[in-house]
Image (cartoon, rainbow, N blue to C red):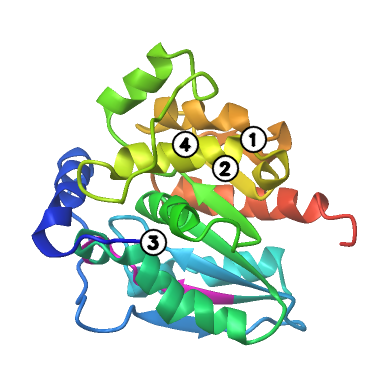
Amino acid sequence: MKTLTGSRWIAIGTCFLLMLGCAAGGNVREPIPKAFFAAPQAGKRVVVVLPGRGDDLASLERKGIAAIIQTGWPDADVILTGLTMPFYREGRAAKRLHDEVIATAQDNGDREIWLLGISLGGMGTLLYEHDYPGQIAGMLLLSPYLGEKPLLDEIRDAGGLRAWNPGPSQPLGPDTFQRELWHTIKNVSQDSARTHAFWLAYGADEPFREAIELMSPMLPAQNVAMLPGRHNWSLWTNAAKTLLERATSSRPHE
């Protein structure tokens, strides 16, 4: 798939920064930063974590998200990443995530691979599904960023996601990425088996609630959790624990 590079992707950074303030930096000339945490038990799966706009690899480590995941899933290796805003602005975030992180994990055995995306990372998780559909066993979305008001109003005015017509798929770019994000969500919504692989949690008092609630009806009810809280780590810590517990209880062999 054709990708766009450099300044042409700055529109992503601009709209997101205007809404939510400063974003973590990163050097796109270097590999995506990452840290590996081996499973306390025999590893059956790998969870790759994509940070929100204000976090980087170091802050993910400080927040202890790897320990939270492994408390819920002690059979999970965890890979924290520093896939920050500059990688999205570069226009190759999904491809670089695949080439530098996911492909290596796939080469290391038959274990399931999951993505856990927080806010901006939730968008990144869905953009990965756009470019590599069905390659990830499951996705844990914590307060995902899902785009701006004009497109959200278009979906709402059409009668919701099921009735909305996204038009033909287009290459990702600064003018198309939001529509393609929702095109991906609609495609998933039409595959009942695939919807069970998506788990979604968000806060009752956060700015993304209305957008997220355009997506949430497509998922099985047990895959969605609205929790008390705002768009911050107090919410995301509880959200991660909740989704890990629910995903575990849904698996008949666990």
Q: Which residue is mark 2?
A: 200
Inter-mark Cα distance, 3 to 2: 16 Å
On the rendered structure, is 92 left or right of 71?
Answer: left
Mark 4 vs mark 2: in front:
2
Q: Is residue 145 magenta?
A: no
Query: Looking at the image, which is closer to me, 12 or 231?
Result: 12
Query: Looking at the image, which is closer to me, 208 or 65?
Result: 208
Of callouts 3 and 2, the N-terminal one: 3
Inter-mark Cα distance, 2 to 1: 8 Å
Mark 4 vs mark 3: in front:
3
**Residue 180, located in which quarter of the rendered image?**
top left
Q: Secondary structure at mark 3?
A: loop
The amino acid sitting under disc 3 is: Pro
On the rendered structure, is 211 left or right of 138?
Answer: left
Of callouts 4 and 2, the N-terminal one: 2
Look at the picture and state if 234 lies above or below 230.
below
Q: Which mark is residue 229?
A: 4
Of callouts 1 and 4, the N-terminal one: 1
Q: Within 10 angstroms of label 3, few (less than 14), some, or many (20 or more) residues?
A: many
* Residue 190 rendering spot, x and y as whole percentages: 62, 35
Q: Secondary structure at mark 2?
A: strand
Q: Which residue is mark 1?
A: 219
Name the quarter where the N terminus is drawn: bottom left
Q: Secondary structure at mark 4?
A: loop
**Range covered by the magenta-colored residues:** 78-86
